[in-house]
Image: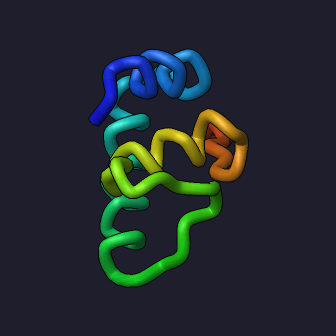
Amino acid sequence: MKSDLVEQASEIVIDPQVLINVVSQRVRQLNNGRAPLVDTLPSMGAADIALTEIIEGKIKVEAPAEQ
């Protein structure tokens, strides 16, 4: 996982725990055969793909509704 991608994604998803959960869920989806939502390079791992999808706005994370 590339640290520059983590830094960029953490500017979009502020809460580190939420970022970890979103990336983990997307990595599972990619490993189970889901197609990437961004152009990929052979050197990119599933976590890099997930982070790039967040950075490019392909995956949105909404704040929970307050009760």
Q: Nearer the viewer, residue 20 or 42?
A: 42
Residue furthest to the right: 57
The quarter of the rendered structure image containing the N terminus is top left
Decide: is 15 above or below 20: above
Residue 17: image x %, image y %?
A: 33, 32
Residue 31: image x %, image y %?
A: 31, 73
Is 8 placed left or right of 21 in the picture? right
> Which residue does the image show at 59% across and 47% down from the upper left?
53
Residue 38: image x %, image y %?
A: 63, 56
Q: Nearer the viewer, residue 31 or 20?
A: 31
> Which residue does the image show at 61% across and 24% down from the upper left?
12
Decide: is 18 above or below 13: below
Colouring style: rainbow
The quarter of the rendered structure image containing the C terminus is top right
Is 61 placed left or right of 9 in the picture? right
> Which residue does the image show at 69% across and 51% down from the upper left?
58
